Amino acid sequence: MARAARRTLAGICPDRVITPDHPRYDATRLLFNGMYDHHPALIVLPRTPGELQDVVRAARDTGLPVAVRGAGHNIAGSGGVEDGLVIDLRLLDRVELDPGTRTAKVQGGATWAQFDATAARHGLAVTGGTFDTTGVGGLTLGGGIGHLMGKYGLSCDNVLSYSLTTAEGSRLAVDTESDPELDWALRGAGHNFGVVDEFTFRLHPLERVHGGTVAYPQHEMAAAVRLFRELMTDAPDELVCILLLERYGPAQIPAAVMSVSYCGTDTEYIASLEKKLRGPEVLDWQIQERPYIAMQQILGRLRYGLRHYWSARCTAELPDELVETLVQRFKAGKWRGDFNDTVYLEAFHGAVRREPERPSAVPFRAARFNVTGMAIWEPAWADEEQIAWAKSVSAAAEPWAVSGDGYINYVTDGGAGGGGAAQRAVRTYGVEGHRRLTALKTRLDPDNFFRSNYNIEPAR
């Protein structure tokens, strides 16, 4: 079967079908999360939307399980599939800006690093991933958290239109007028209905932010979490903070590290903010005016192939009881080499929590915080211990949790067969939201061809 598929696909994408005997096979199949060491039978790299349509049609005929890979950054390993066919979009990575209309056409294989660099040349920006190696497509279709979300909403809130290749190989132009129901679904549950090969984004004038990181020593951890909560409870839309309980710097000192990004121009507020940030004892101060593109790189980059297990819960609040427990969970984590178990806290406010201009399926708008246990380790280390620690962080947040799995881009085991997937999706999107998504899935992908994702099953 794979041999015949290879011949067919090679006719569509000459010299761009990768098989296990190819010298670039291991490098091409590598995913961000090394927990998913998939060995696909075939990897095909279309270069044009027309080729992508032909590849999807051919893939259906092969009978092989299929995965779609953007940047391969998905934490659940959705960009790979064992003994199946990977449709790899990395050559569909063009970014075209129109500074006059402040819009950008971005192909589905582009990364945020590519997008940000192109937009920055024109003094423009949009909410993107806090790790810039993340793919534009995967992040946006799951919602899209970023440093500008308080002011400009999630990544998906800034999409004007989509170009989607369906499971039948048809290419659809989707926006709020052409197909409002599909447009709604692509904003927060979009991995299920086809391959988005191009997004049209609305951009915003932005060159610089006041931001960076401030680190607090271990004995100030609880105070730092409470400060984070206080700042984000009353924050203006222009402020976005993220807090990490981690080991910091070359010396790997236990610390609470707050990422701060303020895209406003109120100098009095900046002075007040810095005074509050200096309330606890400061271990390191790296906050200053800086280019937005530098802010996008502030959390650094991790190489592909490390093992990750992230376990997250969106919560309605961040009470003192949970604050103390999270500090204890950090102290119970492991430190091995360059990587450590990290408690990662995000806050939702401003445009994220308001009704967006374009309706979306995003399930977590009622939440105030996102609490994540991030275990990252080398393949040689014990998986079970790291996974158990990450799960203990989300378990601590469970009493205050809302929206089921919440932000689906952080779900490590959310793909097909991810353990009660249908029930989890109902809890995440709600009964009515899930009903609408199921109806769309039944219309566009009744055979569940696209199922290597946080899956919505068609009606049976």
Image: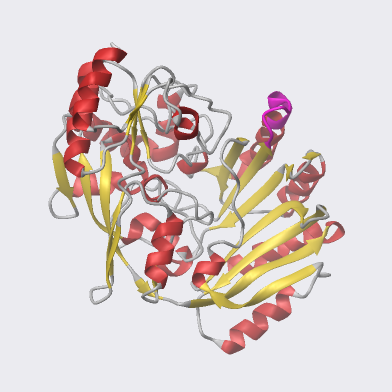
In the rendered image, residue 268, in percent from the top left (x then y), is placed at 60, 89
Judged left or right of residue 247, residue 111 is left
Q: Residue at x 42, y 52 (%)?
A: 111
In the rendered image, residue 431, in percent from the top left (x then y), is placed at 36, 35
In the rendered image, the residue lying farthest to the right is 219
Which span is picked out in magenta? 377-386
Q: In terms of image quadrants, where is residue 69? A: top left
Q: Residue at x 71, y 27 (%)?
A: 380
In the rendered image, the residue lying farthest to the bottom is 268
Q: Is residue 275 above or below residue 74?
A: below
Magenta stretch: includes residue 370: no
Q: Is residue 337 above or below residue 296?
A: above
Instruction: Give the quarter of the figure containing the N terminus.
Output: top left
Q: Is residue 196 above or below residue 30?
A: below
**Residue 6 seen in the figure:** yes
In the rendered image, the residue lying farthest to the top is 1
Q: Residue at x 82, y 67 (%)?
A: 283
Q: Is residue 436 above or below residue 301?
A: above
**Which residue is more in the foreground, 275 or 434?**
275
